[in-house]
């Protein structure tokens, strides 16, 4: 491809993927194979202008996300902490100790009952237990960290 400025011909104005307007600004962003005004490339959740907060953005399920919102919504890998499968962007999830789970995967390790919003659970070494199957004192005396007791919060939809 020939650089049109080298030949003295100004480059053709590009259209912004966000607003559809022509980009005549001094700076523009190129992300996801499209061009953007710096003011138009925003996180779908927090509306932060992505060009102002870093050099990377994330895309999943048609959403454009800043790093913080991507990790908040999908965890570090974008996968369920229990089964390892990808979590679709429009799927409701459960969270515990910074991990993200499919609703069907957020269950007691002993009885396999799915935990519902409002249920109490215990989190031991990355394993979820329901209130009934809470590990006993014998387990606690085997040099494991103390139990972390939590309540399941309501299901959280993306953004």
Image (spheres, helix red, strand yellow):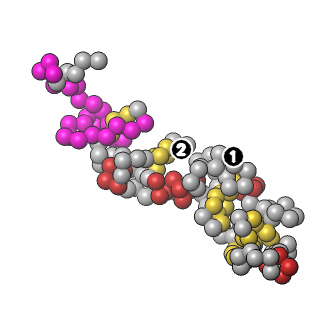
Q: Where is residue 158 in the image (x, y as percent from the top left)?
A: 56, 55
Residue at horizontal 15%, vertical 22%? 6
How far apart, in angstroms, are the residues tagged by discs 2 and 1? Answer: 14 Å
Q: Give whichever of 20, 27 is nearer the camera.
A: 27
Local SS, label 1? loop
The answer to whether residue 148 of the structure is visible from this angle is yes
The residue identified by callout 1 is: 85
Asked if labels 1 and 2 touch by Cβ distance under 8 angstroms, the answer is no
Q: Is residue 46 left or right of residue 113?
A: left
Q: Where is residue 125 in the image (x, y as percent from the top left)?
A: 72, 67
Q: In this view, does 45 lie above or below 11?
A: below
Q: In this view, does 34 lie to the left or right of 61?
A: left
Q: Does the magenta stretch include residue 152?
A: no
Residue at horizontal 65%, vertical 66%? 96
Q: In this view, does 2 lie to the left or right of 141?
A: left
The answer to whether residue 149 of the structure is visible from this angle is no
Q: Is the magenta stretch mostly helix, strand or loop?
A: loop
Badge 1, how many Cα within 10 Å: few under 14, some, many 20+?
Answer: few
Residue at horizontal 69%, vertical 70%? 152
Going from N to C along the chain, the mark reached first, 2 or 1, is 2
Q: Residue 130 carries which label?
A: none
**Within the image, what quadrant is residue 34 found in?**
top left
Q: Residue 60 carries which label?
A: 2
Q: Position of residue 111 (x, y in %)?
A: 87, 64
Residue at horizontal 49%, vertical 43%? 59
Local SS, label 2? strand
The region drawn magenta spans: 6-32
């Amino acid at each position: 491809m020939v650089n049109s400025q080298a030949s003295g011909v100004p480059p053709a104005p590009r259209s912004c993927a966000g607003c559809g307007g022509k980009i005549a600004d001094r700076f523009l962003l190129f992300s996801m194979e499209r061009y953007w005004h710096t003011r138009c490339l925003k996180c779908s959740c927090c509306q932060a202008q992505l060009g102002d907060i870093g050099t990377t953005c994330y895309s999943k399920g048609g959403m454009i996300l800043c790093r913080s919102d991507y990790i908040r919504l999908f965890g570090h890998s974008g996968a369920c902490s229990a089964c390892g499968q990808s979590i679709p962007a429009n799927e409701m999830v459960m969270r515990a100790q910074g991990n993200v789970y499919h609703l069907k995967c957020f269950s007691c390790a002993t009885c396999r009952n799915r935990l519902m919003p409002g249920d109490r659970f215990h989190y031991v070494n990355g394993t979820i237990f329901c209130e009934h199957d809470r590990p006993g004192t014998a387990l606690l005396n085997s040099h494991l960290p103390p139990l972390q007791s939590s309540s399941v919060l309501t299901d959280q939809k993306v953004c």
